[in-house]
Amino acid sequence: MNTGKDSRNCVQAVPTIGFRVFFKAFPQSLEGVAKDWLNYLAPMSVTGWGDLKRMFLE
């Protein structure tokens, strides 16, 4: 299920350069249902690695 939205839209502005690089690269590392899951997240719903991990494990 691809909603057609950009995966990076789920990520809020993150405070460090390392996080910014990670969140720009992370969506490119996903395929199939994992990418669909990321695309399904609400815009601006991820504020850091902890959020992403928690949402994934729910």
Image (spheres, helix red, strand yellow):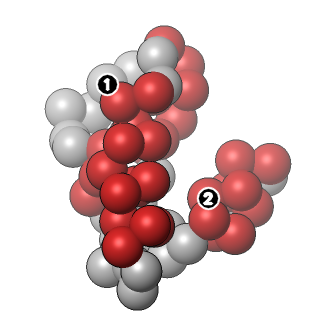
Q: Which mark is residue 2?
A: 1
x and y percentages locating residue 48 in the rendered image:
55, 72
Q: Name the image quarter holding the N terminus.
A: top left
The three-letter code of the residue at mark 1 reads Asn
The residue drawn where x is 19% and y is 32% is: 4
Residue nearer the viewer, 29 or 32 = 29
Question: Is disc 1 placed on a helix, strand or loop?
Answer: loop
The residue drawn where x is 48% and y is 25% is: 30
Q: Is residue 25 visible?
A: yes
Q: Is residue 10 visible?
A: no
51 sits left or right of 15 in the view: right
Image quadrant where residue 9 sits = bottom left
Q: Which mark is residue 10?
A: none
Label 1: how many residues lie within 10 Å, few (<14), some (14-19) or many (20+)?
some
Image quadrant where residue 42 sits = bottom left
13 sits left or right of 48 in the view: left
Residues marked 1 and 2 touching at CB (< 8 Å): no
Mark 2 lies on residue: 52
Q: Classify 25 as above or below 33.
A: below
Label 2: how many residues lie within 10 Å, few (<14), some (14-19) or many (20+)?
some
x and y percentages locating residue 22 in the rendered image:
44, 54
